[in-house]
Image (cartoon, helix red, strand yellow):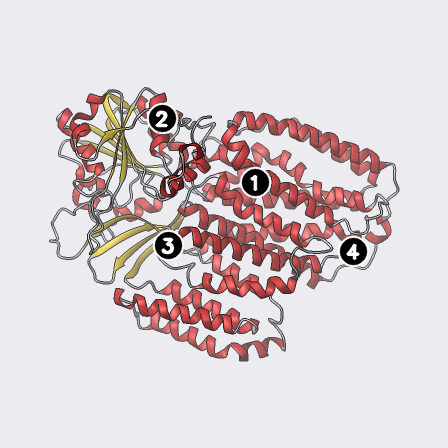
Amino acid sequence: MFTKMVLPLLGGAPTVWSIALVFFQATLLCGYTYAHLIVRRVPLRVGALIHLGTLAAAAAMLPIALASSLGSPPTDNIAFWLIGLFVVSIGLPFAALATTAPLLQSWFAASGHSRASNPYVLYAASNLGSFAGLFAYPTLIEPLLPLHSQARMWSAGFAAFTLLVSTAGLAIARRASPLATAAAAARIPAHDKLCWVALAAIPAGLVIAVTSYVATDLASAPFLWVLPLAVYLLTFVATFRDRPWASHSTVARLVPFVVAPLSVALLGGQRPYWLALVAVNLVAFVLLALLCHGELYRRRPAPGHLTEFYLWTSLGGAIGGMFAAIVAPRLFTQVYEYPILIVAALLALPRVSEGGAGRAVVKTSAVLMLGVLVLIARFGFGIELPAAAELPFQILLVALVAVMLLQREQSARFIALVVLGFLLTGLWQPGFNRVAAVRSFFGVSQVIETTDGQFRLLYHGTTLHGAERIADTAADAIPEPLTYYYRGGPISDVIDAVRSLQGSLRHVAVVGLGTGALACYRHRGEAWTFYEIDPAVVQIGRDPHFFTFISACAPDLPVVVGDARLTLAASTEKYDLIVLDAFSSDTIPTHLLTREAVEGYLNHLTGGGVIVMHISNRYMELADTVAAVGAAEGLGAFIKIDDRTQTSSPDYKMNAEVVALARRPEDVGDLRVRPGWHQIAETDVQPWTDDYSNIFGAIICKQSERWHLPAWADPTKTP
């Protein structure tokens, strides 16, 4: 709920959720430390009273809201600013909640209950409750309640929670604690503590890596955030019990069957079968988390060391989260932390170190030599694979997966083969050569050149953001806009229609830079300003060694860095045309589609101006949402879904879905009669606001179009 409140400040970046998880894990560590000290250092009665005071102090900070004391987000070190925002806004309430699991379990262990000898089962119950809450949020709470109502409801829930904890504290304060002698027992060996930290850190890092993978190519929204986190919590429920849902040996036998195909698909290029890959990633994550958490439960200490156990596991969670969300983006230009964490989780397989490290090296020597040869071929000799090598390369990968499965009983050799799979797919993508890769808070941007030397491409994650023909062009030639911006496409239509109507476009605002292809639509005497949230994209777009659109068409092009909701609002200009091209990726910044956002655009639009929204998306139906938002602000919506036949030989001219919003139909000129354009009929979809959005409904609606489901199955429609 709170992270959704934060999203509008930072462009809807998936990394917002990753940083949120780091904050939650770090605060969990603080809460577990607090619980450990209270249990160990003060009498039980006193500890209960201290905790009631802590809960009261936390309640004084409610209801939850964004703190205004930190101001607007900076352009650098956004992650640390974001953590500060979380600390100031919800630090104390969440820290108070974070103490609950270890504190209540220790109270239960001291209660004299018939099952008090194994309080760890309450940890499974706690995580089951968290799972239920997470599942309810995107399916019940988010679609039905605006954020301010959610915050009030949460505050009421916190009050009820405080009463329940107070009741438990008063009840336990009347009993003597049998944990005193257990606390004085022999100290836990350092080796065991390190194992607890590692077994907790790996799944905690994986949940962030998996979430980033899923959210980058779909949308940054609670619907997608909760999937990995929910199953992560569910693995605790499955393992922290006397009879686990699946035995440790069964989990270990299943792991190779999902990790083997994942090792040759994770670092590849375009992913047309996204649903299957998301499913494989989630299943692999579940099994690896079960593997680590099952081993963690097996190594649990006696109840007298319960709070110490949770203290070390929470430290592991914080370490894993910080590695995946903060350290790795600064170390790697690609998402290499994901395969690294997968390999680390595989070390929990049985018999990995059977016979010692020397024996493991002997078993894997042949695979290790192959890996060395692969590195020499790629970096020593600079070998690239042409497009013609794609089929043989895919056959090689399938054969490698088969070998992995044949060697699955030999854990060390299997892990080595998985590493080899990651190496092959990370180093080679037939038909494409990586020219450069830049990683920022907003993701990984890659400049790719086709091996035939014809085109240079810009990818963000796995989504193509722009292309330029680099072969057979004169040095002083004006580059031709490609992908969604080709001349004659829907975006080109709107620019031409509005310019023809008004004579010229005096001022134009473009949200989203990409390769800068739209700069080549600027005419002499026109003032075009671009707004881009990612400094890495600005760096790539301005560099003529990568793309020449800006250097050839508008070398003096002003680019304002920052979230467009904030930077455009700070502008003093009125624009004849505002082009919103932040939707060309399959990550949709929903805060740019809300009524408040459109109201802000209208404040900077001339009387006859037009707003253009590029809403191409593989997974979400956005046209009705945009039309509903426009209608709520008194705007008509005109749409074209490009159905140009794609050429058999890729020309990188891509079909686009574009909506034009205008106060009056005549403001769009002859656009209404151009082929493919029509006005969107009145819709009963509920318009999105900063307080309400329904990503889940947009996804289901898109799939219902593909599957031809009846209208009543559309969850975006207002009941």
Work out how far the residue at label 1 is from the one at label 2, CA to CA, in angstroms.
Answer: 29 Å
Q: Which residue was labeled with disc 3? A: 271
Residue that appears at 47% across and 28% down: 692
Q: What is the secondary structure assignment of the residue under circle 3?
A: loop
Work out how far the residue at label 3 is from the one at label 2, CA to CA, in angstroms.
Answer: 33 Å
Q: Which residue was labeled with disc 4? A: 302
Amino acid type assigned to the residue bearing label 4 in the image: Ala
Q: Which residue was labeled with disc 2? A: 683
Mark 4 touches mark 2? (CB < 8 Å): no
Which label lies toward us, 4 or 2? 2
Work out how far the residue at label 3 is from the one at label 4, CA to CA, in angstroms.
Answer: 47 Å
Disc with the residue nearer the chain's start (1 vs 3)? 1
Q: What is the secondary structure assignment of the residue under circle 2?
A: loop
Disc with the residue nearer the chain's start (3 vs 2)? 3
Amino acid type assigned to the residue bearing label 1 in the image: Phe
Disc with the residue nearer the chain's start (3 vs 4)? 3
Mark 4 touches mark 1? (CB < 8 Å): no
Q: Can you tell which quarter of the image residue 422 is in?
A: bottom left
Q: Is residue 302 left or right of residue 434?
A: right
Q: Which residue was labeled with disc 1? A: 135
